[in-house]
Structures are given as C-alpha cells and as structure tokens.
Image: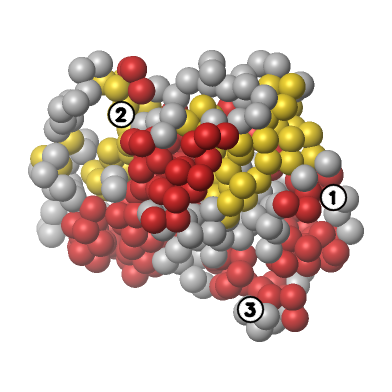
Amino acid sequence: MEKSYSASYAAAGVDITAGYKAVELMKQYVSRTMNKSCLGGLGGFGGLFELDCTNMPHPVLISGTDGVGTKLRIAQYMDQHDTVGIDCVAMCVNDVICAGAKPLVFLDYIACGKNVPERIAEIVKGVAEGCCQAGAALVGGETAEMPGFYPENEYDLAGFTVGAVDKSKILDNSTMCPGDVILALPSSGVHSNGFSLVRRILDLENRPEVLNTTPAELGGKMLGEALLAPTKIYVKPVLAVMDEVVVKGVSHITGGGFYENIPRSLKKGCAARIRKADVKTPPLFGLLAALGNVPERDMFNTFNMGVGMILTVAAADADKALAILHAHGEPEAYRLGEIAEGEGVILC
C-alpha cells in the first residue's frame, strides 16, 4: 500500500496516497467503537461482525440508511466538520429503534471533490462519536474522491446501519387506544432536516456571513453554531424504556415534522392530540419563522419544533417511562399529548 501511486490518476485529480493518510488519521477514532463482536479491522473489503443471539431466539435484522442533507453546507461555510458525522449516525440509528431494534454496526460513505486527510478524519471523528453514543461499531466505510463532480471544498456524507431485535419484541401498535400518553424527547435544535428551507430563509448562498452573527434570541450563541448542533441520539434511553415498559409507538421526528412522522407510529383510528402550548419549542425556531415569514402550519410540517422523538405508552406507564428516560440521559423528557379517536395529528 505504501508503494501504491499512480501519477496518471494524480494528474486526473485523485490522490490515492491522501486516502491512505486519511485512514491512518481516522483509526484512532474508529477504534473507540470496536467491541468483542468485531472481527478484523479496517482495510478489508467488508466489515465483519459476529452476531450474538443470546436472549434472541428469533433474531430479525433491521437496517436503515440516510445522509446529513444540506446541513453539510453550514459545516462547509463554518469550516467545522467534527459534528456532522454524529448527525449521519443519528439519522440512521434513531430510525431503527422505532422498530425496537438495537443498532449493531454502522458504515459511512464520504464523497468529496478533494481528499484532504485531516478534514476526512474530522468527519469520521464525528461518526465514531455518534457510534459510541448509539453503542454501534463502525465496521467500515468508503471515501470517494470525485474531482470535477464535487468542488474541491465540498463533500457529501451518508451512512448505513444494521440493528437486531427478537421477532417477539418488534414494536407493535395493535394495543394503542384513546387515553394513551405521548411522551416527548427534546431535540437539540434543527437536527438534520429542513435545511433547504433554513438556507433559503437566511439567504446563505449570498450572505454566508450571517452564520457568524449572534441573534439576541439565541442568548449570545452564534447562529452557525446553533444550526450545527448535532442531532441527538436516542438509542440508549429509548431501549432502556422498552426493557421495562410496553411501548406502543415510536416516531423519529425528521423531515416533514409532526404531520408526516407522528402518524407513522399510530394505529388506524387513533390520532395524536397535542396542544401547541405544550410543545417546548426552542427560540431558534421562532427566529427562523420570523425571518422567513413561515406560517406556523409549515413550521410544524417541516421542522421537529424541539421534539426529536416521541414515545406512546399506556397512561398507567407514563410516569415510569418518564422516570427511566430521566435516569438515562433525557432529563427534560415530558408529557406532550395523548391518543384520541381519529386520524393523524390534531394540533390544538
């Protein structure tokens, strides 16, 4: 590998030696995610993971894939690349836990105009941090240098996860009924959805310097930093609840906001009734709504509005579920609404 070099490929804009350097730089981060089920290391053609089926007589694999979207543009404007990897992991693992699965492995894919090893390593540093938060192993990935396809300082980032759950424990909403309680797990901000609208509101293509401002609504925090706050990873607190409480539905609130994502976990004939006054919405969303003159309905149909995930449980289990969430890293989890007869989301 050390002797591998192609002058012709380099003349075409691809420096394969930069790829080797990036791998060396990222090894220290990837190693944090490894566990006893990981077989082999980086450099193979595939990541090896030994599946432990203890207490899982009928294992079902659940996979998910996603990217970071145009939030990457914010990172590129800010030249801050160590958090978007967390977003990439979060968008995938938060989806698979909606079925009750524990994420096991993760792989990333980075496509760039120019492979700057230090920047690639920073991206992977964030991916590794996200994997540690989710309890998943980063077993592989790919960095594709694509000159002429991407500008030199631009890149895209996507990921893929596989989780497992026993067939008997796959989440089932068949017992959901009116009176059940909807619990909210707060978001850390915009997470990784709706950034095409964010960029339009802020006119970032023409005024990227606005990211360096400190709006009064944000209490002195720089706007760019607030927007880059990484997506929260809910794996460990949600699985802790599922270990002790019957959870009837889980929704990851991503693009499409309340109106698109909450109904995905509802039983037919059940509606989620939520009072808008009960939604604890951070000031950042109000700022965006005001700057862009965005109607309230569109805000709730685009952004998470401060709620990154919801769990639905029986009313008798609500206090216990909240106590478990509070004890496992979600101290601000709260009652958001209730299940009623009907369909979809009722915001009142």
The residue at 48%/59% (across/down) is 331
Q: Which residue is mark 1?
A: 296
Q: Which residue is mark 3?
A: 222
**Front-most of 279 and 86?**
279
Image x and y of residue 245, in percent: 41, 34
Image x and y of residue 18, in percent: 29, 62
Q: CA distance from mark 3 to mark 2?
A: 40 Å
Horizontal side, residue 171 vs residue 14: left or right: right
Seen in the picture, residue 41 relative to 226 is either above or below; the reply is above
- Mark earlier in primary sequence (1, 3): 3
The mark closer to the camera, 3 or 2, is 2
Seen in the picture, residue 137 relative to 85 is either above or below; the reply is above
Q: Amino acid at mark 3?
A: Met
Q: CA distance from mark 1 to mark 3?
A: 24 Å
Q: Which residue is mark 2?
A: 164
- Mark earlier in primary sequence (3, 2): 2
**Front-most of 202 and 187?**
187
Seen in the picture, residue 84 relative to 194 is either above or below; the reply is below
Q: Amino acid at mark 2?
A: Ala
Horizontal side, residue 66 vs residue 163: left or right: right
The mark closer to the camera, 1 or 3, is 1
The residue at 26%/20% (across/down) is 59
Q: CA distance from mark 2 to mark 1?
A: 38 Å
Q: Is residue 215 visible?
A: yes
**Are dots 1 and 3 in contact, CB under 8 Å?**
no
Q: Amino acid at mark 1?
A: Glu
The residue at 19%/26% (across/down) is 55
